[in-house]
Amino acid sequence: MHPLALAASVLALSHCALAGKVCSRPPEVLFATIDVNKSVYDVGEEIEYTCRPGFVPNSGQRKYTCLPTGKWPLNTLLCLPKRCPTPGPLQHGKIDFTDFHYQSSISFSCEPGYNLIGTRTSQCMADGKWSGTLPQCQPVTCAPPSLSEFGVLSYRRVKPGNISYFLDTITFECMPPLALIGNETATCMANGSWSSIPECKVVTCPTPTGIENGFIEFAVRRTYHYNESVSFGCQPSYVLDGPKHSRCENTGNWSTKPTCKGPCKIPVKKAVVLYNGEKKRVQNDLKEGIRHGEIISFFCKNKEKSCAYTVAVPCVDGNLTLPACFKERGFFSTLVKKDPSDMKPCEDQA
Ligand SMILES: *[C@@H]1O[C@H](CO)[C@@H](O)[C@H](O)[C@H]1NC(C)=O
Ligand SMILES: *[C@@H]1O[C@H](CO)[C@@H](O)[C@H](O)[C@H]1NC(C)=O
Ligand SMILES: *[C@@H]1O[C@H](CO)[C@@H](O)[C@H](O)[C@H]1NC(C)=O
Ligand SMILES: *[C@@H]1O[C@H](CO)[C@@H](O)[C@H](O)[C@H]1NC(C)=O
Ligand SMILES: *[C@@H]1O[C@H](CO)[C@@H](O)[C@H](O)[C@H]1NC(C)=O
Ligand SMILES: *[C@@H]1O[C@H](CO)[C@@H](O)[C@H](O)[C@H]1NC(C)=O
Ligand SMILES: *[C@@H]1O[C@H](CO)[C@@H](O)[C@H](O)[C@H]1NC(C)=O
């Protein structure tokens, strides 16, 4: 060391010893400033830390006094970033964030079918508030559909009001006798266009063909227009099954026609049966058989208990299946044995 410098430092040391101890620069605290910032402080001098804008004291104390030992007391101050309030909610949208602290930024977005009105991002500011105002997600609107065939195709809104929003629907109608080809309803989509727009067309169906064992009522040999209908009937003793009318559909086809179901002959020569709740002799009363859909009950014998029970069978389009337990009686047995229909009924029918 240079002799002169040595002399100077000895001088400084002696000066300090004379004036007592001093504190050096106080410790730096993250995110804080000091009210009086200098390199040397006298014993008893007080300093105060302040958290920087956007930060708040979380723990520890802010004021410290230079101690007679020339040291500062242990610094305990902790400044943490302010937290902005939880943003939102954003109806029909979402908020992306990592945290809500000072200088953080959050971003807004809307669900498909909704447009963001306002700012896309916001920052947590030093005052603990979010910059700007919360944006809104407004539903997409669909312009009224442009109808090329105006006057033929019309539509109405399902919900009242002049404006169609995302997911609103409209229903179309064609002027009779034109047929609507396509989807009758359209939905306002996320991109602001209608899901589909149908067409109105002239549709004819050929002269309808008849049905087996039946006829078309008031049939006229001509082509028919969309939505015209014809009705059907069946020959005597046949039964109509299905819709009575068939309609000319927008495909140019006739809707499902009915069928005529045939009657059933009773496949026994002689028997007493139950028909409409009454005992009938097949050979006398049911020579014509029964109609499709009707039911008759045959008498069967329980030999052990010497009693009789009934089994019901339906006529299904000309088919009638005898119950397995039914025995047609020969001439001899009718003379010597009681007919099951005259026996006492079994209590618990098996
Ligand atoms: C005090 O001032 C010094 C030098 O200008 C600077 O480096 C330091 O960051 C300041 N400390 C505080 C707490 O403001
Ligand atoms: C629809 O618009 C017409 C004029 O364009 C207006 O008179 C009517 O009040 C509107 N209706 C609704 C429900 O906004
Ligand atoms: C008609 O469109 C609606 C949407 O508007 C859809 O939900 C429906 O499945 C469509 N129907 C047919 C038969 O395509
Ligand atoms: C909207 O989306 C449909 C398919 O989803 C597309 O066919 C149509 O062209 C789009 N319309 C517009 C205006 O982008
Ligand atoms: C078809 O005709 C019937 C009457 O027969 C009517 O009630 C119905 O609205 C018509 N349908 C259409 C789509 O024109
Ligand atoms: C009648 O319907 C069938 C399908 O069931 C279809 O293939 C045919 O094209 C239709 N006829 C007309 C004239 O559209
Ligand atoms: C009658 O029954 C037979 C045998 O089970 C069957 O093959 C036939 O299709 C039936 N007829 C009718 C019209 O149901």
Image (cartoon, rainbow, N blue to C red):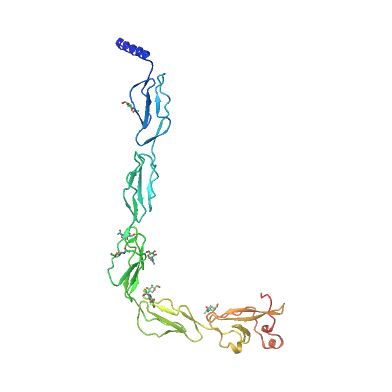
Location of residue 289 with respect to 141 vertically, above or below: below
Which of 305 and 165 lies nearest the eye of the viewer?
Answer: 165
Residue occupying image coordinates x 66% and y 83%: 341
Location of residue 27 with respect to 106 vertically, above or below: above
**Number of callouts:** 0
Question: What is the quadrant of the C terminus in the image?
Answer: bottom right
Location of residue 178 with respect to 196 vertically, above or below: below
Residue occupying image coordinates x 60% and y 90%: 284
Which of 92 and 262 lies nearest the eye of the viewer?
Answer: 92
Image coordinates of residue 73 in percent, x first then y, are: 42, 24
Which of 61 and 106 lies nearest the eye of the viewer?
Answer: 61
Which of 301 and 178 lies nearest the eye of the viewer?
Answer: 178
Location of residue 329 with respect to 50 vertically, above or below: below
The image quarter in which residue 286 lies: bottom right
Question: What is the quadrant of the N terminus in the image?
Answer: top left
Residue at the extreme bottom: 284
Image coordinates of residue 38 in percent, x first then y, are: 33, 23
